[in-house]
Structure formats: structure tokens, C-alpha cells
Amino acid sequence: MISFSRRLLIAGAALATLAGVPAFAQETVKIGVILPMTGPFASTGRQVEAGARAYMAINGDTVAGKKIELVLRDDAGTADQTRRIAQELVVNDGVKMLVGFGLTPLAMGVAPVLNQAKIPAIITSATTSAIMKQSPYFVRTSMAGPQSAVPVATWAVQNNLKRVVTLVTDYGPGIDIEKGFTDQFKKDGGTVVEALRVPLQNPDFAPFLQRVRDAKPDALFVFVPSGVGAIFMKQFVDRGLADAGIKLIATGDVTDDDLLNGMGPSAKGVITGHFYSTDHDSPENKAFVAEVRKANKNMRPNFMSVGGYDAMHVAYAALEKTGGDTDGTKLVDAMKGMEFVSPRGPITIDPDTRDIVQDIYMREVKEKNGELYNVEFATYPDIHDPNTAAK
Amino acid sequence: MLTILFDGIAYGMLLFVLACGLSVTLGLMNFVNLAHGAFAMAGGYVTVIMMNRYGISFYWCLPAAFIVTALAGAVLERLLYRRLYSASHLDQVLFSIGLVFMSIAAIDYFMGGQQQLINLPPELSGRFGFMGIDIGRYRLFIIVICAVLTVALQLALTRTRFGSQLRAAVDDGRVARGMGINVSVIFALTFALGSGLAGLGGALGTELLGLDPNFPLKYLIYFMIVVTVGGTSSITGPFIAALLLGIADVAGKYYVPQLGAFIIYAVMILVLILRPHGLFSREGGR
């Protein structure tokens, strides 16, 4: 009896040693991060990177016995570079996952690389509905653009804003959002008086705003990219549209947390719908905001940043699930259907579309401790991308 | 209707202040300075830093933006630009576009890539009604400043000793030098003036156009359109051109928003078909 249990002990010890070996050697898993760190979209890149690094600072750099290493590359926001860098990262650096992509065309550009190399790419910021169909290896932790527009439409009708002018930037995400908003708004019984599209390169909003003023709607629904949104909103107030009784409702891009303080008092009272606010009240978010502020000269994390943070969570959790196996197909399968609590609130990766399903909050810009914040006042849970769910 | 006209004029005037420095360097000095927008951006950032970091009044920022960028222009002219006066236009283009990229990277490094916002003094924001026209206070302010500037500039170039010396220096540098005109100093001053105007335009434009490190490339096309349509031989040309383009752009976007961005290009093409050298030029419409 004694000898048997001793043998078992020795065998057990031997097994433990064997199993322990890879843990000690700590194989490194490289994750390629491709972001616009320079050029017009540099602030996106900086926010996503801050978010991803914050995740690693809070959760450590080892998972399933593997050491995680980020390989950050700058594509300056041009699609051909994104694709070339993706190829280099996969072929030369041997990355097992890709993370990033600031804009739709950049994400689209890497789809062929993913399909060939069979490795997952987690999208942190690009938002059009069309991306997800380009590759079965795409997983998204930012949002599908129209996701945040749909609850805004519902909220508007509920609050008696029934005649609305829509104004969006004339490019992929803008058109997606216009459709998402309009479909829902009409279904709920609202009327779109006029649908305006503003060119991407537009120096002056005066003519568009004047047109809105003359149309006298109950509210103006707006989507413009975040930097432009700040200028737009100031001109909205300056033109006296608010005084004329026209409400401004928008997606959260317009009151980007990163820029909100600089917009000054004119931003107060603006109603937006979005998936993340720096002000979101949860322990996960408090830790996240504190970490980003500490590591980035007190920069406020915005919705781009939380996309980077959650991308890292998805990557970590997938490795955990596969037990450290870095086979791309297994990783994507592990990501499908994943559920967790992000700093933005509870989120799910839809197992069919690999797209994010999340709560959308209605927020109002308010002053808190001398700073401006998007303060959440209503939650619309489990919102899917309406453009793909419709099929 | 009249409100649209007013908005168009204000926008045109802003374009003029931003671009007239370029028509000075390009038209009078015959130097293709594509880095013009970088000076405008510098003026904008001077304003942002003064207002947001040190809380200095917006009214002081405007002259400061002019002076700082004029000085920067003078320094760069002495160090770099001067060597390229006799170089081919292609060399000038390559050199100045290189400067643009350097300025973008430098601003991005020191100030970050995000949009910079300023808050105007309360008396400049909002609007008032005047004989049925809705007038934005800040737009009126822009119009007044630009009108004063245009008159002053026109007088300076046609009526002053400096103006005639400059024209002489440009037309025939050797003879001008023989007449005792210090051509080199005249050029440095002119270049500084052009840069300073750009800086002032950048400071005025921050509120309306926004300001981020990509400013010089984003608006380069507008500066070029104004100068091309206006012709390069006078200040009046770009002035009329800027007004025409500003009004056409704003009115076009109001009445036919579907066409949006194309109006300004359509006007440019039309003008250049009729008058290939611009509205006002020595060559005239041939």
C-alpha cells in the first residue's frame, strides 16, 4: 500500500514538473496592434492604446501561462498601410491576434490577410455594419454605428420630439447611422422632415444649420465624427437653434468625453445616446478611468479607449478558454458568445455575427465637480446592430 | 436669404485672411509656399495656448498670433526660404510641403492630435436680428476685421514707399538693387507680413474651422483655390475670389445640400475656363 501511494506521488510529481515546464519557460504570445497614431485620427489611436495598456496594467501581462506582448504599429489612417503592416506582423513578427483599426476602410483592408492567415482581429473603433461580413475572423468590441442611434430615436418619440431633421456626415458610418435612426424613428411614429448629409471635408456648418432653423423641427438628430462634433455643437448654440426651441439629440460622438470639457458651457443639456461615458457608475469603470488618467497625464478615457480595453479582455479570455492554444480558429470560436462586464457595462459578443451586443445609455451633459460629463439617465439594454439584425 | 448672404460673406472674408498671405508670397514674391497653412496653424495654436493655458483675453491673442507667426516667418525666411528664391518651382513645392509634414509632426508631438477648442468672450457669441437678418456676432467681428485689413493692405501695397519698393524688387531685383533698395530686407519683411496674416487668419478661424495638427493639409486646397481663382497680381483679386467662393459655397450648401462640397469646385472650374489666369491678373483673360 505504502509503495503504491509513493509511486503515485512520484508519478504525480513528475507530471506536475512536466506540466510546469511551459509555465516556467513562459512562451510569449504577441498581439499586433494597428492604430492611427499620427495623422488626422491620431487621437483615436492614442485613446485605444491607452485603453489596451490600462487593461494590461490592471490585469497583468500573463494569461494561461503565456506572456502577452503588444506590438504597436502606426498606419497613419491609410488603408494600404494597414494591410501591409498586418501582413508584416503576421508573417515576420508571428503575431497570433490583431487588434485596432481606426476606421472602416482600414479594417476592410486587413480582411484578406485574416482570411488567409486564419487569425482573429478584434476591432476597437471602426463602426460600419458592412465590416463584419468581410471575414469570419473579425470580432468587434467598439460598436456598430447605428446601435446608439436606435435608442435615441425611441427616446425622442417618447419625449414628444416627433418632427426631426437628421444631419450626418456623408460617409459609411454616417449613412449607417442615418438609416438606423430613421428606420426606428418612423416605426415609433416620428416624421423625418429633412435628411441632410454634410461632406466629410466641411469647413463651415452655417448653411446646414440655417436650413435646420428654417425647417423648424422639434429636434435635430446629429452624427458627426467626434472632433468635428465639438465645432458643430458650438455653432449650433451660436446660431440660436436652442433658443428657437430646437433640441439637439445626437450619438455620443458629438459630446466625446475627451473633448467635452473644452466645449465649455454651450455643451450643457445636450442629450446623446451612446455606449460609454467616463461618468458611468461602476467599480470596473472607476478602476479603468483611474488607470488611464494615471498613465496618460490625466487624459480622460473616451469610447475609443474602452474599445481597446475590452479588446484586450476578449483576447485574454479567449486564451484562457483555449488553455493558451493560439490556433486562430479556436481563438475566434472561444470569443463567440463571450459575456463579461466591461467598464461600459455588461456586454456580449454575438455568437453569429461576432459583433458586440451592449447596453445603450441616454445621457445629458451636466457639470460635476467643475467638469462636464455625460451623465447617464436611462438604459436601453442588449442592443444589436439593427442593420444586420433586420435580416 | 440675406442671412445666408451674410454667412457667406463672413466665411469668404475668413478665407481671404487665411489665403491673402499666400497671394502675397506667391503673387508678389513668386514663391510657391505650400507651407502657408502651417503658419495659419501656428497662429491658431498661439491663440489656443494663450487662452486655454494662461487665460489671456481673445482680443490680445489676435495681435499676438500675427506677431508670433510673422516673427517665425521672418526667421524661417532668413534661414531657409531665402536660399530657394532662385530655385525652380518644383524645388519650392517639395521644400515647402516637407515643412508642412514637419509642422504637423511637431504640433502632434507637443500638443497632441486632438481637436483644440477655445471659448470666445460672451460678447462675441450669439446673434442679433437687424432688419430681418440674423447676424452672428462673431461673423460680424470677422467681417469688420477683414474689411479693415483689406483696405490697409491695399493701401500699403499701392500707396506707400514700401509697396512701391516691393513691386520694384519683384519686377526687377537687379535694377531695384541698383537704385539703392535693399531687396533682401524688403523680401524678408514681405514674407513676414504674409506669414503674420496667415497666423491672424488661423487665430480667427479656430472657432469656426477647428484646429488640429492636420490643419495645413486640410485647408491647403481652399487657399490654393482662392489664389488661383483670384489671380496673383493684386490683393483685390483674391479678395473678390474669396467672397465669391464663400457665398457660392454657403448658398450652394443651403439651397442644394445634395451637391454639398462640389459647388466650390464648380465655381473654380467655371472661372478658370473663362479667365485661365484668375479673375484679375496682368495677363487678363486669354
Image (tube, rainbow, N blue to C red):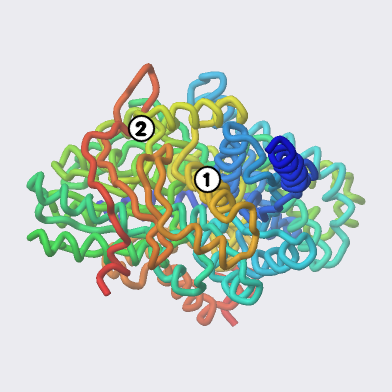
Type of the residue with mark 2: His
Task: Determine the CA span between mark 2 and mark 1.
Answer: 19 Å
Q: Residue furthest top?
A: A369
The image quarter containing residue A268 is top left
Q: Quadrant of the N terminus of chain A?
A: top right
Q: Is mark 1 on a helix, strand or loop?
A: helix
Q: Residue at x 38, y 41 (%)?
A: A276
Q: In the depicted view, which residue is nearer to us: B88 or A389?
A: A389
Depth order, front residue of A306/A40: A306
Within-10-Å neighbours for mark 2: few <14, some 14–19, many 20+: many
Locate residue A251, reporting x and y percent.
32, 49
Q: How many residues crowd around disc 1 within 10 Å: few (fewer than 14), some, or many (20 or more)?
A: many
The reply to whether residue B218 is visible in this rendering is yes
Q: In this orientation, does residue B189 appear?
A: no
- Residue located 24% across and 52% down the image: A221
Is A191 rendered above or below residue B262?
A: above
Q: Tag 1: residue type?
A: His
The image shows a total of numbered marks equal to: 2
Q: Given the image, what chain letter belongs to the residue carrying mark 2?
A: A
Q: Mark 1 = which residue?
A: A313
- Where does label 2 land, which residue? A280
The spot of residue B87 in percent (x, y) is 87, 63
Tag 2–tag 1 contact (CB < 8 Å): no
